[in-house]
Each structure stands twice: as C-alpha cells, then as structure tokens.
Amino acid sequence: MQLDTADYILRVTAAGGLGAVIGIERESRNQLAGVRTHALVATGAAIFTLGGAFGFPGLHRGPNVDPMRVAAQIASGIGFIGAGTIIRDRGSVRGITTAAALWVSAAVGLAAGAALWGLAISGAVVTLLVLVVLRPIRSRLLTFTSPRYTVKVEYQRGHGTLGPLLDAINDAGGHVEDLSIDDDANGRRTVTLDVRIHDDEDLREAVRLVSERDEVARCTVHRR
C-alpha cells in the first residue's frame, strides 16, 4: 500500500494541529512545553510513523527485516542530541522547542532518505508553519494568562543600559507591554515597564543582574 502526497499532507497537518490544540491547554497553564513544542512533537511522530510504514517499498519485509526499526532507532537516538540543546539557566528552562525542532528534522530526514518526497516536503512545510505562525499565538496566550508586573529602573544616561535591560527581560520569558522614559536635567533616566511573565522569580533575577551595573541607582519590581 502506498499513499499519495495529499494523504501525507492531511495526516501530517492533522497531527501538527492536534498537537497544537494540546499545547494551547498546556501553555494556558504556564507549563514549559507549550503550543509549538507539542505541535512539533506530534508532527515528528506522524512523519516517523509514515516513513517507517510506507518507506522502502522495494525492500522485502520479513520477521528480521522491518524498516520500522530504522525509524524507531532514529527517533530514540536523536533524543540524546535534543536533550543537549535544553539549557537550565537561573531556575528557568530554555531550548525545549529547539530540541523538538531537531527531533522533527530527523523525521524529515528519514522521509527524504526513504524517497518519500511528498512526506518530507509536507513535513518540512508544517514544521516551518508551526515555528513561524504559532509564535504570535504563544504571545497572545502569555498576554491573557500571565500576571503583570511594573519594573522601574533608575540609572545615569549614556551607558547603554536600556538594551541589556530589555534583553534580560526577554531572556527571562517576559513580554514588555508598555514602556515609558523620563529624563531629568541631571542626566538621570527613569524607565518604567509593564511586563507580563509566568514566573516572577525569573523577572526579579533578570532585574537584579541589571541592578549590578555601575550606572544603575535603583531597580524595583511590583505586581500590578
């Protein structure tokens, strides 16, 4: 039995969509693995299944010859590499989506190696859609489900402080909704930010690191 390209697209897209639905629920509950991670894992699982089941049509299958074993070994083996891309930093975990993307890339490679071109192309397209299109959905979920904090930082102008501050908040998983800047005549600048974030400890740690800069006079974090 062989599948045509339309069947591949339907099955892979359905897997990615259903995984995204599950991920939305997890994202709404502030879990680490969210929309894109679930969608990628579901997509990769579908590609591995189809690649193992319908790949290598010219190979005679028997008790000791089963192409499904190739897919199983790749799926488990690439997990070790994916685990290496996950980083635990100051109590937060990053890189889960990258690990999932690496895993699904291995599935796409399996499909291409088995000459299942329709499956490989559709898998790559769905993966790109998951990574690009679902990113705004994650930001919207963060907006609706995460508490809001006010961060106020006072520092001396001319040291390039604002850029590292925004980078630190972004690295902590925060989303800046509003920002205001007030400069006085003595060269002192006060920046006030409205931030949405799942874990306030990550936000406080990011602000603490910025507060250690020489030009920074004061940093405060308050929940709104």
Image: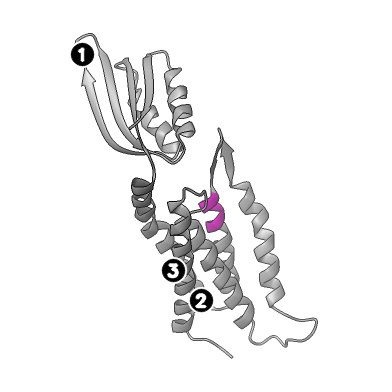
Residue bearing the label numbered 1: 184
* Residue 136 against residue 107 in the figure, above or below: above
The location of residue 169, given as percent across then percent down, is: 40, 34
Report the magenta residues as a range. 96-101
The quadrant of the image that shows the N terminus is bottom right
Residue closest to the far front: 224
Element under disc 1: loop
Question: Residue at horizontal 71%, vertical 67%?
Answer: 73
Is any part of residue 46 visible from this angle? Answer: yes
Around disc 2, counting alpha carbons within 10 Å, would you say few (fewer than 14), some (14 to 19), or many (20 or more)?
A: many
Which mark sits nearer the N-terminus, 2 or 1? 2
**Quarter of the figure with residue 191:** top left
Query: In the picture provided, is 185 more to the left or to the right than 78?
Result: left
Question: Residue at horizontal 65%, vertical 59%?
Answer: 78
Query: In the picture provided, is 196 more to the left or to the right than 16?
Result: left
The quadrant of the image that shows the C terminus is top left
Residue bearing the label numbered 2: 119
Element under disc 3: helix
The location of residue 152, given as percent across then percent down, is: 33, 23
Amino acid, disc 2: Leu
Residue closest to the far top: 186
Element under disc 2: helix
Kindly check if marks 3 and 1 are in contact, taking CB atoms under 8 A apart as contact: no
The location of residue 223, given as percent across then percent down, is: 36, 31
